[in-house]
Amino acid sequence: MSDSPAADASPEKKDFIRQIVREDLASGKHRAIKTRFPPEPNGYLHIGHAKAICLDFGIAAEFGGLCNLRFDDTNPAREDPEFVQAIQDDVRWLGFEWNSLRHASDYFSVYYLAAEKLIRDGKAFVCDLSAEQVREYRGTLTEPGRDSPYRERGVEENLDLFRRMRAGEFADGTRTLRAKIDMASGNMNLRDPALYRIKHVEHQNTGNEWPIYPMYDFAHSIGDAIEGITHSLCTLEFEDHRPLYDWCVDNVDLAGHPQLLQPLLDKGLPLEAAKPRQIEFSRLNINYTVMSKRKLVALVQDGLVDGWDDPRMYTLQGLRRRGYTPAALRLLVDRVGISKQNSVIDFGVLEGCLRDDLDAHAPRRMAVVDPLKLVLTNLADDHEETLVFPNHPKDESQGSREVPFGRELWIEREDFAEVPPKGWKRLVPGGEVRLRGAGIIRVDEVIKDADGRVTELHGWLDPESRPGMEGANRKIKGTIHWVSAKHAIPAEIRLYDRLFSIEKPDDESDGKSYRDHLNPESRRVVHGYVEPAAAAAEPEQSFQFERTGYFVADRRDHRAGTPVFNRSVTLRDTWAAKA
Ligand code: ATP
Ligand code: MG
């Protein structure tokens, strides 16, 4: 599998963001570009984040720029170091490496100085209104808001109150620092938005140093400016926040006031202040999935899935365990493209990306999911031989492997029919079929138990049809896969399918919730047999099990010798026909 984005052979991308970047470099507006991926460490990343990651890191790499990973950890009550680690693992797994790892909390002292500057410039004030009063004063989309009675406080009083907020003198929620912009603005985000709130909560990085925390819009825009981000890419819901983003950047004016960055110099962090530009793109939405963190958390907490990395989850950890490859997810982002148009991508597109990657790269193996014994009675009891199979039919560089063959084989139960339906090409009593790479067999006898269930087939292997023999290419309708019963390794095989059975599990308009739409067939565990070369796999190795699907050795539970395989995706789209 190609593990690095550089190995993705894709033509030059021409979406509107890359065009902006190209123009900015051509005009000399920027000599080099810089982006960032700014997750909030309050959950695991999901497939939607893959789009943002591929865009932020991908654009930086394509244009010789840099991309930072910045944890937006301004909301201490909701954050967990476990997520911080998992997010780093996920970004690296997708094939990207950050220039610098930052936390918004690295900048708390700069944010604080920036806020004092706004106060001194008469552009921010301490407001004593309660949250409820702030809402009342804010107005509505059709009515202007009203000025806070505290809006005209003098600079000295504001500075004194803000310093006392910072000193921890006031209780949570009693005061905020607000930007002084325009209570009549048509954009609600500009109606004197809060810049700081009081929150006596311990922070995982700064402990109890700060009883006040900056609000998202302030912290994010100034964080971008501090890092010298040139293109700050985010999803469309932030479009209405852009005027506030620009207001913060322009009015704090870090480039014109480098002394605000002194706390970072003291910490040894390099200074890169620049004027960033926010550009929005549409989110990735995929049918048959839920992506909101709240719903993903609930699935785990209510035991509807087996944890964050359950192979049916649409977290990156879940997709990884399912057998999704980084290259497949990058391909998805390329295929979906970047625009401002909201759309819902069909789940089949995601599956198609995985099939395309694995078809090209995954070695082939044979595995039997629902075993039925086939005894070749014209071979000696102790007959044993080793056949050599190519690992990949279209890629010689993958070499070959040895596949043991013997008198007793496991074949797929569904490859035999006593009473075949029309057009059947596989085994029937008295009929012939090719055993992949081994020869042509005929079924002579069907053995059944007392209940009439077929327990064993006895057959005859045509000696003239063996590999290298004259009759090896004799025309025959069907070919089936098999494993040698003596050599095959028992394997736990987990047959996964989509977690939800309807296209819009998120749609609650009919009073139902996504939990009502779980696909009861999304996980079926069977015990089958795999050829020795599959059992020897390392965890996370992907294969095409011939005629059966694409499978991956489970990241957690697979051991060489006691194999556990997850079905990543079927060979063909079985849902397109259903829909
Ligand atoms: P959610 O709303 O699912 O909980 P979030 O947006 O709160 O996710 P963040 O950690 O804030 O999660 O997101 C980090 C970055 O990923 C942001 O820039 C955000 O715009 C982007 N992102 C989140 N979801 C998607 C998505 N579905 N498609 C593209 N980008 C996304
Ligand atoms: Mg968010």
Image (spheres, helix red, strand yellow):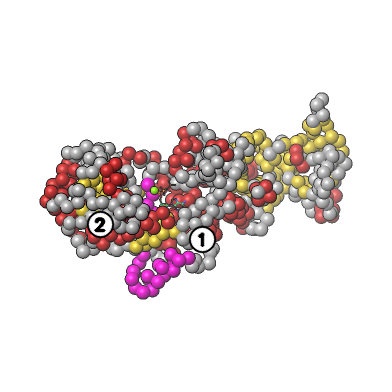
Tag nearer the camera, 1 or 2: 2
Is residue 239 left or right of 185 when viewed as pictured?
A: right
Circle count: 2
Kind of residue sitting beneath label 1: Gly
Write the residue at 39% across / 58% down: 239
The reply to whether the magenta stretch includes residue 74 is no
The residue depicted at 33 percent of the width and 53 percent of the height is 143
Q: Which mark is residue 551?
A: none
Q: Residues within 10 Å of mark 2 (few under 14, many from 20)?
A: some
To which residue does mark 1 refer? 337
Confirm or reject: label 2 Cβ below 8 Å from ligand 2: no
Q: Residue furthest top?
A: 450
Residue 471, x across and y down, in percent: 84, 53
Amino acid at pointer 2:
Ile
Magenta residue check for 30:
yes
Q: In front: 95, or 49? A: 49
* Magenta-tinted stretch: 15-40
Q: Residue furthest bottom?
A: 27
3 lies above or below 29: above
Q: Is residue 124 visible?
A: yes
* Residue at point 70%, 40% (across, down): 368
Near-viewer residue (196 or 33): 196
Q: Quadrant of the N terminus?
A: bottom right
Residue topped by disc 2: 181
Spatial CA span between label 1 and label 2: 37 Å
Question: Is residue 377 toward the left or the right of residue 20 in the image?
Answer: right
Q: State left or right for residue 183 relative to residue 141.
A: left
Position of 237 relative to 540 (above/below)? below
Q: Residue at x 49, y 57 (%)?
A: 342
